[in-house]
Amino acid sequence: MTADEYIATRLDEQIAWYDQRSVRSQRWYKGLRIIEIVVAASIPFMVGYITEARPSVAFVVGLAGVAVAVISGLLAITSTKRTGSSTAQRASPCGITSTDSSPRRTRTVATMPFITSSTMWSR
């Protein structure tokens, strides 16, 4: 086995593994988001049914609120949300990849006003 064959074989295996992992992670993310939206939307509906005769509804509403907060927090911590740009571009502060020799201006830099110490204190 030559070095090129070894690299191609190993790379193909790794790409396949990452593809499978990506599909699985995306399904989990979308499933949790759907659950979060449905539970959050049902809270105002359930509040209308809270009465002294049915105090358990208040418990269910509280539990639903906790579930929404936990799901939202877990999704935020794990940072599963994608921006659409490639990993290399997100990792590089200038958006320069190893195959790209010209730096890109990001929207943040292009729309940021130029602030100097004289303009900060002139207001």
Image: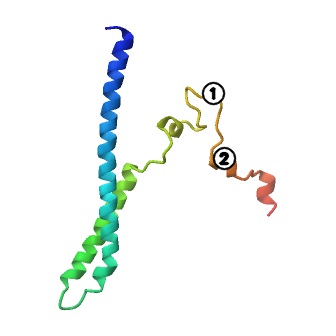
Where is residue 38 shown, x and y percent of the image? 31, 68
**Left or right: 51 in relation to 117:** left
Residue sitting at x 32%, y 46%: 25
Tell me which residue sits at (81%, 54%) in the image.
Answer: 118
Closer to us: 4 or 32:
4
Image location of residue 66, percent across then percent down: 29, 68
In the picture shown, does residue 89 fall above or below 3?
below
User: Which comes sooner in the sequence, label 1 or label 2?
Assistant: 1
Instruction: Determine whether label 1 and label 2 are within 8 Å by CB.
Output: no
Mark 2 is surrounded, within 10 Å at the Cα level, by few (under 14), some (14 to 19) or many (20 or more) other residues, namely few
- Most extreme residue toward the bottom, as rendered? 52
Q: Residues within 10 Å of mark 1 (few under 14, many from 20)?
A: few
Whether residue 79 sits left or right of residue 112 in the image: it is left
At label 2, the amino acid type is Val
Query: In the displayed structure, does residue 41 sit left or right of residue 85?
Result: left
**In the rendered view, does 79 fall on the left or right side of 117?**
left
The quadrant the N terminus occupies is top left
Per the rendering, the mark at residue 101 is 1
Residue 58 vertical position relative to residue 16 in the rendered view, above or below: below
Instruction: Work out whether residue 120 or residue 28 is closer to the camera in this orientation and state it.
Output: 28
Q: Which mark is residue 109?
A: 2
Q: Position of residue 121 (x, y in %)?
A: 79, 59
Report, in whole angstroms, how far the alpha carbon at label 1 lies from the one at label 2: 19 Å
